[in-house]
């Protein structure tokens, strides 16, 4: 594409030779830009075809994509001709539009690499003379790459900024939907909302999480502290609905194998300050009132050795103990005396009461559980009767002792 009129003539003076090369370069660059300008439609069409074939995410967006590539080429021409200095806001806006269309950031970045490769293929095929050792093509190509790098940085920032805004808005919306469910919705509304939040399972359960020794209000103010537990619960790249409700992190999980596996591994991954309570599975068509109450009670029972407590693992006595707040005057003096003497007896009396409770009062089975002789159990029963006038063979008494011990374990009686 060199202009013969500007070729050097034999015998030219050195000064003339230099002037001739400069003019040739100027004409060559001008002609190369002109060739690009005359073929914008052809170039953009070819690059669009390659892009769609390389990046499946762009299938169905061919018309819009070709228009964007044409803008890229026109913008480069403006920069190369010196008529534009600033970045084209239309390309920045296009990146934000891609985010709203649900494109992946990697796909968008890759598309710029395809554009670069397509431009190179067209230029070196259609304008080979300008890409020889003396041509202006490589200089112009380097200009294109420098400009492309500027745009890739700018549009990537715009894309992820828009994506973050979308995610933040979606998170607020999802949390608001969960808040509404936890505050009480009819069964049909619960089912529709859970489906909209991505829960397709027929049965669900709730996990209530909290930090010990931390002001619950801080959870809402510092949600980043929740990220580790959310990441572990949302195994297999699921997006589970969650919110911070009454000072607890509440996560809704489908009742499936993945959820159970995540919960099974959770104790080994939790920070020492985190406790979790899990509700029973519940139909997704029911109100969340019951699973919320169950998860909250299970959370109250978590702590110490068991930091993840499943409501299903709690006995009715333990459930009652979690909801009771006993006062000192509520406990019969004889049972208080029993507990005080048990400390002096190295907790043998309480161990015997627990074993008899599990054995429904059967002395032989209780002895077997404690790995002692049957006569030892009879001896302890007699000692308790003599000291505080209580009969450890009474199932009602055993139930009261179990209830009181559960209250002490859960901190509802001191």
Image (spheres, rainbow, N blue to C red):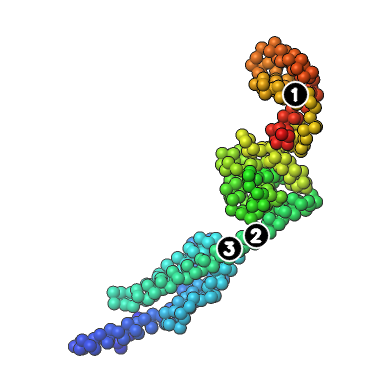
Q: How far apart are marks 2 and 3 (CA)?
A: 10 Å
Residue 406 is left or right of residue 59, and the answer is right
Q: Are marks 1 and 3 in contact (CB under 8 Å)?
A: no
- 247 lies above or below 114: above
Q: Residue at x 53, y 72 (%)?
A: 92
Task: State the residue position of label 1.
Answer: 337
Residue 144 is left or right of residue 258, and the answer is left
Quadrant for the C terminus in the image: top right
Q: Which mark is residue 163?
A: 3
Residue 84 spot, x, y in % from top left: 47, 81
Q: Quadrant of residue 374?
A: top right
Task: State the residue position of label 2.
Answer: 170
Secondary structure under tag 3 reads helix
Q: In which quarter of the image is residue 260?
A: top right
Q: Which of 32 and 237 is in front in this view?
A: 237
Q: Residue at x 75, y 34 (%)?
A: 321
Residue 52 spot, x, y in % from top left: 52, 64
Q: Which of 254 and 217 is in front in this view?
A: 217
Residue 319 spot, x, y in % from top left: 75, 35
Q: How far apart are marks 2 and 1 (CA)?
A: 59 Å
Identity of the residue furthest to the top in this view? 375
Choose the circle earlier in sequence order: 1 or 3.
3
Few, some or many residues within 10 Å of mark 1 (<14, 14–19, 20+): some
- 315 lies above or below 355: below
Q: Are marks 2 and 3 in contact (CB under 8 Å)?
A: no
Q: Which of 176 and 6 is in front in this view?
A: 176
Q: How far apart are marks 1 and 3 (CA)?
A: 66 Å
Q: What is the count of numbered marks? A: 3
Choose the circle earlier in sequence order: 2 or 1.
2
Choose the circle earlier in sequence order: 2 or 3.
3
């Amino acid at each position: 594409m060199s202009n013969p009129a500007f070729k050097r003539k034999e015998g030219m003076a050195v000064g003339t030779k230099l002037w001739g090369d400069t003019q040739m370069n100027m004409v060559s660059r001008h002609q190369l830009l002109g060739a690009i300008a005359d073929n914008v439609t052809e170039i953009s069409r070819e690059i669009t075809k390659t892009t769609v074939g390389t990046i499946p995410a762009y299938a169905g967006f061919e018309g819009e994509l070709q228009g964007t590539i044409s803008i890229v080429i026109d913008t480069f021409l403006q920069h190369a001709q010196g008529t534009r200095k600033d970045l084209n806001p239309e390309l920045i806006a296009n990146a934000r539009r891609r985010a709203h269309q649900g494109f992946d950031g990697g796909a968008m970045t890759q598309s710029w690499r395809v554009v670069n490769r397509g431009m190179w293929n067209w230029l070196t095929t259609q304008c080979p003379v300008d890409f020889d050792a003396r041509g202006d093509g490589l200089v112009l190509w380097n200009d294109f790459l420098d400009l492309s790098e500027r745009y890739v940085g700018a549009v990537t920032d715009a894309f992820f900024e828009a994506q973050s805004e979308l995610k933040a808005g979606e998170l607020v919306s999802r949390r608001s939907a969960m808040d509404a469910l936890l505050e009480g919705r009819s069964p049909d509304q619960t089912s529709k909302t859970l489906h909209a939040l991505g829960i397709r399972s027929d049965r669900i359960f709730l996990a209530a999480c909290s930090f010990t020794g931390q002001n619950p209000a801080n959870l809402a103010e510092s949600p980043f502290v929740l990220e580790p537990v959310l990441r572990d619960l949302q195994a297999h790249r699921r997006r589970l609905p969650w919110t911070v409700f009454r000072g607890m992190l509440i996560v809704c999980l489908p009742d499936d194998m993945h959820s159970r596996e995540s919960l099974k591994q959770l104790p080994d991954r939790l920070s020492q300050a985190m406790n979790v309570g899990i509700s029973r599975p519940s139909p997704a068509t029911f109100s969340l009132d019951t699973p919320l109450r169950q998860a909250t009670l299970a959370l109250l029972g978590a702590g110490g050795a068991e930091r993840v407590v499943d409501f299903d693992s709690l006995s009715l006595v333990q459930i009652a103990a979690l909801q009771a707040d006993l006062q000192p005057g509520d406990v019969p003096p004889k049972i208080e005396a029993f507990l005080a003497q048990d400390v002096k007896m190295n907790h043998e009396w309480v161990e015997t009461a627990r074993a008899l409770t599990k054995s429904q009062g059967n002395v032989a089975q209780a002895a077997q559980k404690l790995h002692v002789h049957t006569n030892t159990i009879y001896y302890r029963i007699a000692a308790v009767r003599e000291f505080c006038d209580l009969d450890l063979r009474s199932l009602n008494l055993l139930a009261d002792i179990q209830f009181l011990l559960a209250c002490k374990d859960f901190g509802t009686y001191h």
